[in-house]
């Protein structure tokens, strides 16, 4: 089983200040940005070079303020077979919070309560039971 560290997500209510910090302060480059009008949020990614692990800043539009401790979102890992990975984790007693119903993404928590996003490498896998019919078993 191969796993690759992808990114850590931090929530921000200061996207402009954060941009300056990560680019001018740390010397990272902005690798991409996705803005969702429907969801009212922006995802902004920074890394030391293209293809390297990233810091994902999530800016939820509006007046929401964050306090120390609630900005951190999740760690993300790419996996070769999301179904097999979730099966292995489940056999170890890990609760699958968001099952990989779409063959692409799942969420779990580590023993410390840290949210972990698992993302399928390449194309989504075809829907597969028992994952396809599973409901969320928790929240992340």
Image: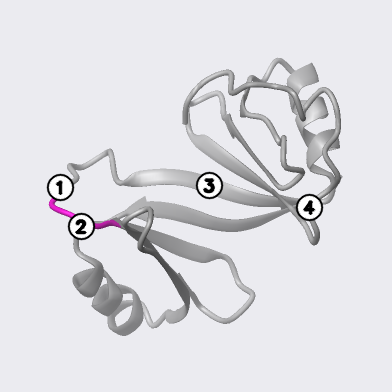
The residue that appears at 77% across and 57% down in the rendered structure is 121
Are dots 4 and 2 in contact, CB under 8 Å? no
The secondary structure type at the circle numbered 1 is loop
| Mark 4 or mark 2, earlier in chain | 2
The answer to which quarter of the image holds residue 23 is bottom left
First to last magenta residue range: 60-65
Q: CA distance from mark 3 to mark 2?
A: 20 Å
What is the basis of the colouring in this image? one colour
- In reply to whether residue 31 is colored magenta, the answer given is no
Vertical position of residue 125 compared to residue 42: above or below: above
Foreground mark, 3 or 1, reads 1
The secondary structure type at the circle numbered 3 is strand
Vertical position of residue 21 compared to residue 79: above or below: below
- Residue bearing mark 4: 124
Q: CA distance from mark 4 to mark 2?
A: 32 Å
| Mark 1 or mark 4, earlier in chain | 1
Query: Where residue 56 is drawn, which disc sits there?
Result: none
| Mark 1 or mark 2, earlier in chain | 2
- Asked whether, in this view, residue 43 is left or right of residue 121, the answer is left
Are dots 1 and 2 in contact, CB under 8 Å? yes
The answer to which quarter of the image holds residue 83 is top right
- Asked whether, in this view, residue 47 is left or right of residue 62, the answer is right
Q: How many marks?
A: 4
- Residue bearing mark 3: 75
The residue that appears at 25% across and 79% down in the rendered structure is 20
- Residue bearing mark 1: 65
Foreground mark, 3 or 2, reads 2
Foreground mark, 1 or 4, reads 4
Q: Residues within 10 Å of mark 4 (few under 14, many from 20)?
A: some
- Residue bearing mark 2: 13
Vertical position of residue 35 compared to residue 110: above or below: below
The residue that appears at 58% across and 66% down in the rendered structure is 53
């Amino acid at each position: 089983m191969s796993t690759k560290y992808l990114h850590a997500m931090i929530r921000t209510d200061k996207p402009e200040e954060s941009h300056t910090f990560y680019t001018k302060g740390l010397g990272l480059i902005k690798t991409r940005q996705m803005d969702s009008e429907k969801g009212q949020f922006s995802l902004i990614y920074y890394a030391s070079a293209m293809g390297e692990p990233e810091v994902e800043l999530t800016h939820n539009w509006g007046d929401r303020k964050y306090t120390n401790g609630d900005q951190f979102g999740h760690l993300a890992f790419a996996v070769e077979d999301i179904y097999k990975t979730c099966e292995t984790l489940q056999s170890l007693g890990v609760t699958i919070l968001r099952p990989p119903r779409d063959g692409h993404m799942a969420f779990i928590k580590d023993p410390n309560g840290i949210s972990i996003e698992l993302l399928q490498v390449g194309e989504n896998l075809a829907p597969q039971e028992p994952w396809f019919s599973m409901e969320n078993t928790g929240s992340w």
